[in-house]
Amino acid sequence: MAEDRMKGLKSNYKKRTEEARRLAQEAIIELVSEEKKVNFNSVHNRSGISKSFLYEDDETRKRIEEQRAHDVDREMNRRARYEKTSQSKDVIIEAKDKRIARLEAENKKLRAEVEHLRGLLYAGQ
């Protein structure tokens, strides 16, 4: 009789554990598809699974930590891309500033030349 109870308890425990893992995995997939951060708290809120289970179950913990590391890598890549874009903008602005300075100098030189030629033209009349 006691053995039957133990088998029943173990069977029930195994079912509940598998169900909790499935719910946690579904929550992780939903969070990833919505491009939200995956961490123990967000999985707990989405799935309703206790945080203690998420931390203590090695399989679930590993999945959450792997996804969290992946999220961090994605964020670092995004920041690196932004920094490159910002640096590129600085280079473009510097090149345009040099071009503007060169064109202003050329414009000033041409205005002086036109003024000189007008003076010669009016002096000859």
Image: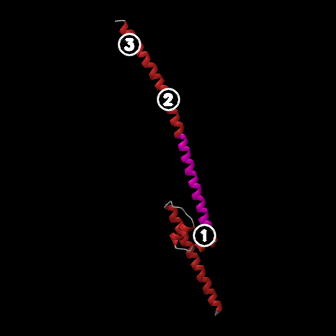
**SS at mark 3 in the image:** helix
Q: Residue furthest left?
A: 125
Q: Circle 3 sits on which residue? A: 118
Magenta-highlighted residues: 61-88
| Residue at 61 percent of width and 64 percent of height | 65
**SS at mark 1 in the image:** helix
The quadrant of the rendering that contains the N terminus is: bottom right
101 above or below 115? below
Say if the magenta span includes residue 81: yes
Query: Percent x, y for residue 45?
Result: 51, 70
Q: Circle 1 sits on which residue? A: 60
Does residue 4 appear to the left or right of 34 in the view shown? right
Q: Circle 2 sits on which residue? A: 99
| Residue at 53 percent of width and 39 percent of height | 90
The crowd level at tag 1 (other Cα within 10 Å; few <14, some 14-19, many 20+) is many
User: What's the residue type where badge 3 is placed?
Assistant: Arg
Quarter where residue 8 is shown = bottom right
| Residue at 59 percent of width and 57 percent of height | 72
**Marks 3 and 2, how far apart in space?**
28 Å
Quarter where residue 43 is shown = bottom right
User: What's the residue type where badge 2 is placed?
Assistant: Arg
Query: Percent x, y for residue 31?
Result: 51, 64
Query: Percent x, y for residue 20?
Result: 56, 75
Observer-nearest residue: 80 or 4? 80
Query: Percent x, y for residue 53?
Result: 60, 74
Which numbered disc flags the more N-terminal residue, 1 or 3?
Answer: 1
Q: Tell us which disc is closer to us: 3 or 2.
A: 3
